[in-house]
Amino acid sequence: MGLMMQRGYQVARVLLGIWMAGVVVGLFLVVPRYEGLGNVGRIMILHVPTAWVSVLAFAVSAFFSGRYLWRGRPTDDDRALAAAECGFLFTILATVTGMIFSQAVWGIYWNWDPRQTSIFVLLLIYAAMFALRASLENVAQRRQLSAVYSIFAFVTVPFLVFIAPRMSESTLHPNCVFLPGSKCEGVELAVGNVGLLGDRKVSLLGLEERGTTLTAQVKMSEPGLASETMLFPTFDLATGKSGEAADIPGVRHRLVVQRVDRTSGRVLLNLQAPGTGILGNQRTLLMFLASMAGFTALFVWLLQIRATLLEVQWLLTRREEQIHV
């Protein structure tokens, strides 16, 4: 039975390697290029799954921490620690891939966007847990305190990953314009009004009607007033739909007039990105699901390896203590 399980693990490792290699190759041969984004859009097929696996890993860590407090078995603590380490690793991968995407699309790697800030706080929380374990020499105390810490740390994960980033509008994350079903509220202005669209200041200087076409004269200021540019998005009054979008210099977003209220003279300005509907293509969706499955299986494999190493390390430590005694 042991030999059959060992062969099964070997076959599973080979299949996992082939699967992940297929995902990487498929990113370039199967997934089509995104209009306006080119090859950089493909990184989302890696970014989202790594973020998902990090949440899964922290949940698994909290689960085994609870089992350790209930049963007191060292193997449960080993699995809890291994899962937390895997979650920390995948969180770093999600952060790095997100930064690369941010630089390519928005022209900046990091500016303490709400989602970037929350993920940084999450990394600090679990780094503190590892520091706590390293500072305690008493094994039983280390296992118990870290188990309690892991459970309370996971309570923050849903808030930091799903809630906190949505409490503040942000242009440095694709919630608004890339993910299906999401909504951008935009900013509604009358002539002479100033507002914020993400972290950019927009001023509506005027509205000009020519036939059924309305053109908005908008001055947009970059964060920190680094630069200003004039944009002229249009709106088709006959159809009630956005007309031509205005390209925003330095980024791949565009400014659109989403709605016009001729009674009050107010227009709704919003962001548009060429990557809207990123999972709308069937081939892209299949590759996304394949990537999710592959990274989940990779986490399970890493968890088993790390937990086994921790168990062996514990057994060797106990044997050395017995020899010295």
Image (cartoon, helix red, strand yellow):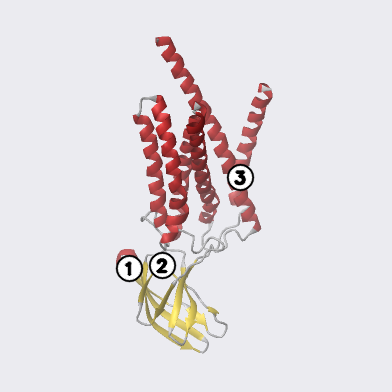
What residue appears at the point 66 percent right and 26 percent down from the top-left corner?
5
Q: Residues within 10 Å of mark 2 (few under 14, many from 20)?
A: some
Q: Nearer the viewer, residue 168 or 289?
A: 168
Seen from this angle, which residue lies furthest front? 70
Please give the residue where the numbered disc 1 appears in the rendered image.
227
| Element under disc 1 | loop
Mark 1–mark 2 CB contact (< 8 Å): yes
Query: Which numbered disc, 1 or 3, marks the residue closer to the eye?
Result: 3
Percent position of residue 92, x then y = 44, 44
Q: CA distance from mark 1 to mark 3?
A: 44 Å
Q: Is residue 131 left or right of residue 100?
A: left
Q: CA distance from mark 1 to mark 2?
A: 10 Å
What residue appears at the point 43 percent right and 12 percent down from the top-left corner?
322
Whether residue 25 is visible here, answered yes or no, is: no
Ranked by sequence position, the earlier of labels 1 and 3 is: 1
Whether residue 69 is visible here, answered yes or no, is: yes
Q: Residues within 10 Å of mark 3 (few under 14, many from 20)?
A: some
Mark 2 is on which residue type? Pro
What residue appears at the point 55 percent right and 31 percent down from the top-left corner?
304
Mark 1 is on which residue type? Ser
Please give the residue where the numbered disc 3 appears in the rendered image.
293
Please give the residue where the numbered disc 2 appears in the rendered image.
249
